[in-house]
Image (spheres, coloured by chain):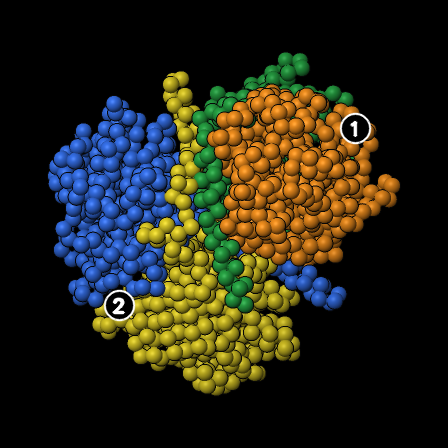
Chain colours: A blue, B yellow, C green, D orange
Amino acid sequence: MSKGTVVLAYSGGLDTSCILVWLKEEGYDVITYLANIGQEEDFDAAKKKAESLGAKKVFIEDLRAEFVEEFIWPSVQANAIYEDRYLLGTSVARPCIARRQVQIARQQGAQFVSHGATGKGNDQVRFELTCYAMYPEVKIIAPWRIPEFYNRFRGRKDLMEYAEKHGIPVPVTPKAPWSMDANLMHISYESGILENPKNHAPVNLYLMTKNPEDTCESPDVLEIHFTKGVPVKVINVKDGQSKDTPLGIFSYLNEIGGRHGVGRIDIVENRFIGMKSRGIYETPGGTILYHAHLDIETFTMDREVRRIKQGLGIKFSEMVYNGFWYSPECDFVRHCIDKSQENVEGKVQLSVFKGQVYILGRESPRSLYNEELVSMDVQGDYDPCDASGFIKINAVRLREHHRLQGEASSNR
Amino acid sequence: MSKGTVVLAYSGGLDTSCILVWLKEEGYDVITYLANIGQEEDFDAAKKKAESLGAKKVFIEDLRAEFVEEFIWPSVQANAIYEDRYLLGTSVARPCIARRQVQIARQQGAQFVSHGATGKGNDQVRFELTCYAMYPEVKIIAPWRIPEFYNRFRGRKDLMEYAEKHGIPVPVTPKAPWSMDANLMHISYESGILENPKNHAPVNLYLMTKNPEDTCESPDVLEIHFTKGVPVKVINVKDGQSKDTPLGIFSYLNEIGGRHGVGRIDIVENRFIGMKSRGIYETPGGTILYHAHLDIETFTMDREVRRIKQGLGIKFSEMVYNGFWYSPECDFVRHCIDKSQENVEGKVQLSVFKGQVYILGRESPRSLYNEELVSMDVQGDYDPCDASGFIKINAVRLREHHRLQGEASSNR
Amino acid sequence: MSKGTVVLAYSGGLDTSCILVWLKEEGYDVITYLANIGQEEDFDAAKKKAESLGAKKVFIEDLRAEFVEEFIWPSVQANAIYEDRYLLGTSVARPCIARRQVQIARQQGAQFVSHGATGKGNDQVRFELTCYAMYPEVKIIAPWRIPEFYNRFRGRKDLMEYAEKHGIPVPVTPKAPWSMDANLMHISYESGILENPKNHAPVNLYLMTKNPEDTCESPDVLEIHFTKGVPVKVINVKDGQSKDTPLGIFSYLNEIGGRHGVGRIDIVENRFIGMKSRGIYETPGGTILYHAHLDIETFTMDREVRRIKQGLGIKFSEMVYNGFWYSPECDFVRHCIDKSQENVEGKVQLSVFKGQVYILGRESPRSLYNEELVSMDVQGDYDPCDASGFIKINAVRLREHHRLQGEASSNR
Amino acid sequence: MSKGTVVLAYSGGLDTSCILVWLKEEGYDVITYLANIGQEEDFDAAKKKAESLGAKKVFIEDLRAEFVEEFIWPSVQANAIYEDRYLLGTSVARPCIARRQVQIARQQGAQFVSHGATGKGNDQVRFELTCYAMYPEVKIIAPWRIPEFYNRFRGRKDLMEYAEKHGIPVPVTPKAPWSMDANLMHISYESGILENPKNHAPVNLYLMTKNPEDTCESPDVLEIHFTKGVPVKVINVKDGQSKDTPLGIFSYLNEIGGRHGVGRIDIVENRFIGMKSRGIYETPGGTILYHAHLDIETFTMDREVRRIKQGLGIKFSEMVYNGFWYSPECDFVRHCIDKSQENVEGKVQLSVFKGQVYILGRESPRSLYNEELVSMDVQGDYDPCDASGFIKINAVRLREHHRLQGEASSNR
């Protein structure tokens, strides 16, 4: 008698293969689900592997386009960045993956979902909050938080033994001494030898970006067009290449950014569960877009709107990092940020070179930049005398404060 | 009969030389004051020039050390950055310069101060708010906001003619088609051909940093030591060079940053007076410190303290940009930020290469990073089962929201 | 030859009558405009007076309904309150008045607008920013900031003499030793004997509300219905009276609040121009709505949305106080706040008694309140064990902090 | 063989008496601890009861003075208020109680602490986060979250039976159909018949405050003196009574507030664990102080400092509500707020009448209020012309925005 059906987020790797078999052992029917969000993967092989291990159904879902349009684009609009540095490549992928998982679970009548995320990380939270938000009655099986599971599989060696015993094909190449997570937006590296925060990252770590020491000696110059805060076209000024679909644009920016070694960071960050962790990330296309969007946004958005929106963007980033993409507050903030982007339109020229993105210039039909007003050579519609009054009135408060301090000190 | 004594912030250039003579013409006694805040300048020549033009006294003040310690260091602690990009090199220099000007004015019994800042810019505000805050009774003469002055000098040609007529030495080299402002922290470029925001900056613009295309092909690796959020030592790992005074550290970081082309930005920003302007900045040492401090801060500071401090840092940056360094709110925020830095201690290793700063690793005796706690290989003092409860409770609110939406849609 | 046409915001009082005549003297054609925003006023008499003083046209505009719907309602949605106490009764009226003034000016081809606000207050700013925002080319004549005017009229005595000389009817009753400003939302009192912040307000000051010592000895109980954060109906539970138009609702709440002495405050506040001032306000209906809206909002709005919205409401209040109702940032924030009110629906019962508003209970079809979930008697869909994990994970960070402090102290 | 020693927070009531016996049954040695934080209680009787039930030691600790000085006073400085209404009377008591509990546990060598808080509330979080923060290795026994306990005691009836069986004296008076929590600062009421949010509170509910309908017909007028944002003296203007110790001041304000029915609220609030709950609170003295402190603070604090401090106060309130009194962020914010109070000095006169607090006037030697500057009758050191420039410059941005919109619409 089956305990019920589980939709398992399956990667094809050793961990989730063991989980698949273990879930069966525990009496569940298992449906595997593998999302294609742009990672390098042999999806056919993964499918066959899952079937051979006893999955009742196997779903391989290409989510790349919706990942870009519904998850990366809002993050670009928000200038989303966690703790001033991390562009949230993993964080935005999780709700995209979990949403589809929940849809499959509902559609297949599965009461359970399962995943291979560890018990110390952020991803378990991101996955599960999405599941609970979209399918409140769902039951979640997180083996790495179940004592019978994690006490049985205390290390890779235990998994390997289990795999051999249960006919799970084991990897032939030795595992890198760190773990990684890849998608269209970025690759993250952590754990293993990276856990010591003073250890430098090995030079051969990075897979999406070339080492800046080895990149080509001349920049690529791009022109990125934005409408409502979202890129709608990218043109390579050198060779005229151009892309205009979301997936096409983002993939092309990854290619260019990767070629020039753009978007590598090595940080210590604060996880939602309260511990600090060290992560290394490479986000080539996302880094280019971050800079380009900041530029066109400041060019077209009113100063005070920008100030408020900046605060909303910081909140958005924290929510997304913590796993609250599907929450009333994140819905609300996304709506507000989207509203702020109405006039964020125009094009930015930038060059990409040796790990760096340089903004070169910008144009917009909706800019609030007024060349005549700001010019040092012409007066424009501006009377410099007004500035005297402006400064004097701004000084009223400061002079009062000084007066009080003077009184205070003379009374001592 | 003199109208009184003016302390004029004098640069030695054409504008303030004309102002000096014009103030005398208007009946003032003029004391000139030239602050050395690290700009390239022939201070002796400027002194002689001022004397020859009739300055009653000439003050040349070396403010470099106090500029670093009292203005740049607090900005480093704050991770001060305006509108996500500008490191405030000019903004922090103005209160430093104006403070000394006001001290001289008080000491010399001068009722007036004067400067050559334009009527459309931020600097007039920064200068004058500092003056009013520290010397509330002072009277400020801002010729570029006085109609008789600015109507008489409508362009450089008028200044040149006036100079020739009054024996003011005129520059022999043609003026660059933009204006610049230099100090120890940065050089800014704006106006002229840069006013069109789509024009690319000329390649020969930059004076502090080499063009990344021309910089050397191997990185410098630095180790920067921090105490209380402030750098106390920098060591070049390659050659063992080391600096440990504030001015020594900052100058050395400028040298290394300049050599590798670090810290160039081209932005459109929002001035306090309400217009957008385009500015190009190079801040080599400041950029290195920005990255290094961010890293050691996140490594040593509690997550929630960091979140609050980040908000204070944004406010601080706006205040400083707008000219409110000497204000009760900026005093307050500086105090709070300083408090937050108590544990920001340790060292950061980074490499500087081709315009980019790469963090390589960090160490600290006061870090909140706990390698055992975060490790994927050992459990540490952590029970993964707790995370289930944590997630479930965080989901309570999300599930309630979903319930309500479900009811709402089923009632339709 | 006329200098042009001025639309003067005319109150019918001594000041603006003198301004009317003075403007004519200065060579302008004057159109007077008097907005009915609910103040007690003999509008016919004011009209005749203006005509008799030479106004070329006289506009008397009933703005009461639009004042409630377009200005008070958004403030209710925002829980708008300045510096934790002031409900912004004057601040929200100014853009309403100035908007119509500008419309008349455009329609009548007038290049000028004028008003009688003083040079030290907030109202000049609120009027003029609205004018500039909606009619950027307009020229503003603010006599109380024009030296020829204010030096000529140094006190009330000068105005009286001028009035007599120019056939302006002078008030026969002596002026109260304070000034006041009244509209549908509130009356404010300031200046004169109130300028000393320790002087108590005279008992006979208040005009909209009865002294709580003299109000009736039994409460009124109201039920207020909200849709999208805005009141749509009020019912008096005692006598069944009911109102359902915006103006009807608000006027009725004023009546009830006034009868019970609700909404009196005596505060020192910070003006936009940098000085502190003392103001006394009575806002009977607004105070009732403030409490009722807070209640229904917290009942129906998600906690985290509320937190973000609370921050937006504070910003909104500052903008409105400072005169930026018509600004891109205020448009943006109003839009966001409006979005947040989608589910703010339901009814609140409250009693009004002796200066106080007591919330008694609330109901809503869209509440997030779940009686079963929160009950101490039934478990609902909630597992108390989850709370242990929730607390443990929240403690991870705190325990780490303690560990570090312990290490720090043991190293001393 | 004992499982170890538990320090149990003991109230003397049925629940914690059963817990005491149950813990013994489970094999623990139990030390009971009862904090006197101002609640009505027969402490001697509670002591005897605990001893008779087998407590190995009994601690009765009078924490009233430290509760006022170390917990209520910082909250007054912060104007602490949760979700715009709740003055946090329970929230600030919890860390005060738990701190002493942990001190006793350490001192007595107890590895365990226990409490009777339920599994759905905030108090469990507040207690336990304090314990973990101050005694990270402590083990917490929360019976209401332990299935064996809560399944055994499913209602009051089960507790009564258990009590009878184990010789625990049972209450003779029937329990009120709600639960309450009392301390020096407030009494809270919730649960039972109050769980339905539309039910009105019964008239006989309140214990600290008289019903405003029954209070005396003339106000009390108080003068409260503040130093560094904290009350140092209260004088009753009518009868000259005066108090000048923290506990004396706060108790007296409770007496006056209670006599006039001040500080009753009925709210729905958002718990940290994600559910909405309905609470009724009466906070007589705290409400008076809230109003008085707001007044003296705005009178003496710079506008922009106040704005920043207001934001910090909101964060402080959330932290305290959620149980993070002992956290690095709360330490940090308390420090910042304390710093902001340096000049918050002076006295406030107010009247207390029929449930309401009316500010009458205020004085301070350190006020930033400048009567001459703000006066409508004298000019002071202020030039009204400056306001024109101030307004014009503030309008630059608004006019630009209008220009852009005009272009946008004319292009349509």
Regarding residue C139, the answer to whether it shows in the image is: yes
Spot occupied by residue B124 in the image (x, y as percentages of width and height):
50, 64
Q: Position of residue D342 (x, y in %)?
A: 66, 57
Name the residue located 13 percent from the left edge and 55 percent from the top edge. Answer: A239
Which tag is nearer the camera, tag 2 or tag 1? 1
Q: Mark 2 highlights which residue?
A: B354
A47 displayed left or right of C147: left
Residue A270 higher or lower than A203, as above or below: above
Q: Residue at x 21, y 34 (%)?
A: A32
B148 vs D182, nearest the viewer: D182
Q: Residue furthest top?
A: C240
The answer for which chain carries disc 1 is D
Q: Is residue B409 left or right of residue D305?
A: left
Residue type marked 1: Thr
For the residues labelled 2 and 1, the Cα–Cα distance comes to: 78 Å
**Is A100 or D153 nearer to us in this picture?**
D153
Q: Which mark is residue D215?
A: 1
Q: In which quarter of the view is residue D14 placed?
A: top right
Chain under callout 2: B
Q: Is residue B154 visible?
A: no
